[in-house]
Image: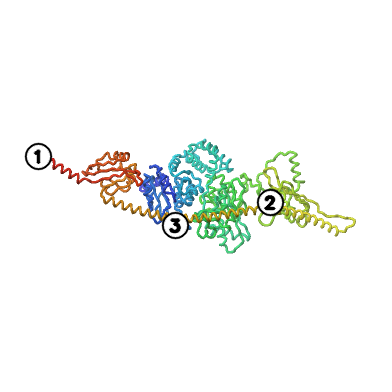
Amino acid sequence: MNAKSKKPEKENTSSQADVNQFPIVGIGASAGGLEALEQFFKNMPEGNGMAFVVIQHLDPTHVGIMPELLQRITPMKVLQASDGLKVRANFVYVIPPNKSMSILNGALHLFDPYEIRGLRLPIDVFFRSLADDRRAKSIGIILSGMGSDGSIGLKAIKDKSGIALVQEPSSAKFDSMPRSAIDAVTADIVAPADELPVKLIAFLKITPKANNYFDIEGKDTSSIDKIIILLRENSGHDFSLYKKNTLFRRIDRRKSVHHIESIQSYVRFLQENPKEVEILFKELLIGVTNFFRDTGVWEKLKETVLPDLLRELPDGYVLRAWVTACSTGEEAYSLAIVFKEAFEKIENHKKLTLLIFATDLDHDAIDKARKGVFSKKIAEDVSPERLSRFFTAETNGYRVNNSIREMVVFAPHNVIKDPPFTRLDILSCRNMLIYMEPELQKKLMGLFSYSLNLGGIMLLGTAETLGTYNEGFSDIDAKLKIYKRSTTLQSSELLDFPSSFFQHKTMIPEKKSAPKIVENIQTLADQILLQRFAPASVLVNEKGDIIYITGRTGKYLEPVAGKANWNIYAMAREGLSHELPGAFRKASQSFDAVVIRNIKIGTNGGTQFVDLTVQRIESPEAIKGMFMVVFNDVPAIIEHDVTSQKSGKKSSIGRQKELEIELNRSHEEIQSIREEMQTSQEELKSTNEELQSTNEELQSTNEELTTSKEEMQSMNEELQTVNAELQSKVSDFVRSNDDMKNLLNSTEIATLFLDKDLNIRRFTDHVSKIFKLRGVDIGRPFTELVSDLQYPEIESHALQVIKTLITIETAIETNDKRWFNIRIMPYRTLDDRIDGLVITFNDITKPKNLETELNSTIEILKKHNLVK
């Protein structure tokens, strides 16, 4: 760098440091917000080191007076925001009417307001830009208001490690906005508006002792490990391989909320307050998401990646996708929508379907995702065409259409310890790996490679990369982080995971031989019995999925064509498949064994008779509720009469026996079905009665709602009338105010109105000839004014009048030889209540001068004895 450029660079660096050194507080408010803002700023001290930006829902057709109203409350300078205005500490900025506002590099930028599907969301717009611009120095506050504007912006601030404050809903005039914010994020502070300033300042004063996990002392490192243990015991999830800096920041935030200085004290606090462990767990689950996040990724999928993949698939193929860390489901639904759009782009229309598995640690987020209902704010991220095609508009937002909802299966799942979803064609893991240590990232990449089919697509977040874990993957678009599985990863990488993927063990070749174990005689005998003499059997769960196989079951079960399916109903051979459902039905009703004898099973080119035993397992606990299915071979049933029957007769008798057995079994099945139908009929009758009762209640509720609607309409009309009356009264007040001002000025008597604290309330124009007064001085103490009056007792006289209610009148001279008759009297309201003082200044300079001249003339005349 040359000498000429050195100085400007230094100034620029300093300027940039100034921009980033103080927090910026965004305050969102709507209906009832003015009162909450007054309570907030009355209690916010001057010189607090913060800048405040007020985003209030304003009437776009009226001139805003919010800066003047707030200036009366706070000693800080209040300005209406203008385009390009630099934000300064200890200033308050108010959004102008009919504008949208953002912030970039510490400067405010105004835009023409834009509506998204009929909604204006100025608070969300500003909070999002504030989070991006100020990051950890961003602070969001939601006060009284209707609707839910600000909730998404507050989530963005929390995602950038900013601070979220919400007015206590019970203290707000309209609690819809505060409640929506509390539902959307875990607020750092929830309190009445007048208490928020003190709590915010106290929160900011508690600064961390170390900014980096590796800077903290060994004792603190041990405390963080203890916190990880408490989290694991409470939630069942292990955070030991999450990035320690992320853990440290979240822990430090919770310490600040509770004003706890040391991390050791916070460990004790967690032990004594299990609810705090749940809150910390929620803090660590960073659930920021939205539809079509990073639009370039979704456009690439829609235009090229998915169409190319779909063209290569056979007709009738079912694609499998896994969306990890899905939060409230926006990304999973986005993938379903893009699949629908991409499917339409391929010329050769095949019968292809997509099944999406969407998983997350957070059970509450999964429950919300399953409902498929989102607020109207999604219109910011979803185009009108997609909204009309894939969503149904409801009163409070949008519901995902059934065609999209049925493509997604949501489930709580821990990607670290739970078995993965396999045979995948698409895998999305966006913005999750950045919070994990390299060791865990490496394991997950091995898991993802194992789960994906050859040629499968993997999506990562824009801040994530394969890095050194790129074995088995090739780039589709490195910039957008879209990859394809190109080769098979060595299976040994998977064996480090706790689950060991037991259902896939037979597919994973063991590279290392198991250590030799010294076995006793009983163990060897048991093994020989199981291998050579025990009947073939399978252990299945309640859905029929095979968990474990003993012996050779090929005579009874066979793989089905197509994709691998390890379900006993699908694998059962001819003859057995008809008997299994009924046997399972009976077995599920108790823990007794159900035996069906002499079942004729079709084998490869022949038949086989078998006794089937199905029993529900009562113990041990690990497999309780599962079913053991046992196959026992039996000889064919043929009657032999060697003396008198011909060979044709023998065959006929054997066939007759088979038919009799099948008939008896059919009678038993019919009887069982009849009993089940009777039970079902009784249950249906009971259900029908409950539905009738519910229907009557719903009809009653509907009538009440209709009545309430009519009452609401009536109330709305009354409110409109009241509003018109108030507007009329305001107009009358403005006219009366103008009349009074003109009247006072026409008297040419300087008049000053003070409140009980001697603060200026109003003054006439002539007062400015005595005191140096301007309009901005309203609200200032009267005693701070500079004047030419030689009247030092004016303050004491004013206080005396307030105390005694007796008028004081005095003639006072000024420094420039003017005289005023000053009259101090109480200010009385219409209901005869004292509410301040009225001070009049009547100019008597001319009478005083005439009096002085007269006195001088008299003295001269007396001196010459012309008068006595």
Q: Is residue 16 above or below residue 217?
A: below
Residue sticking out furthest to the right: 643
Q: Position of residue 107 (x, y in %)?
A: 40, 50
Which badge, 2 or 1, comes first in the chain's sequence? 2
Q: Position of residue 499 (x, y in %)?
A: 63, 45
Q: Position of residue 109 (x, y in %)?
A: 40, 53
Q: Relative to the observer, which residue lies in front, 142 or 204? A: 142
Give the number of the mark in front: 2 or 1: 1
Residue sticking out furthest to the bottom: 347
Residue type indicated by callout 2: Gly
Residue type indicated by callout 1: Asn
**Residue identified by numbered label 2:** 544
Kind of element beneath mark 1: loop
Q: Is residue 6 visible?
A: no
Which badge, 3 or 2, comes first in the chain's sequence? 3
**Residue identified by numbered label 3:** 114
**Residue identified by numbered label 1:** 865
Mark 2: few, some, or many residues within 10 Å (few <14, many ≥20)?
some
Mark 1: few, some, or many residues within 10 Å (few <14, many ≥20)?
few
Mark 3: few, some, or many residues within 10 Å (few <14, many ≥20)?
some
- The structure residue drawn at horizontal position 63% and vertical position 60%, both measured from the top left corner, is 316
Which badge, 3 or 1, comes first in the chain's sequence? 3
Whether label 2 touches label 1, CB < 8 Å: no
Instruction: From the viewer's perspective, tell me whether residue 686 is left or right of residue 760.
Output: right
Give the number of the mark in front: 3 or 1: 1
Residue type indicated by callout 3: Tyr
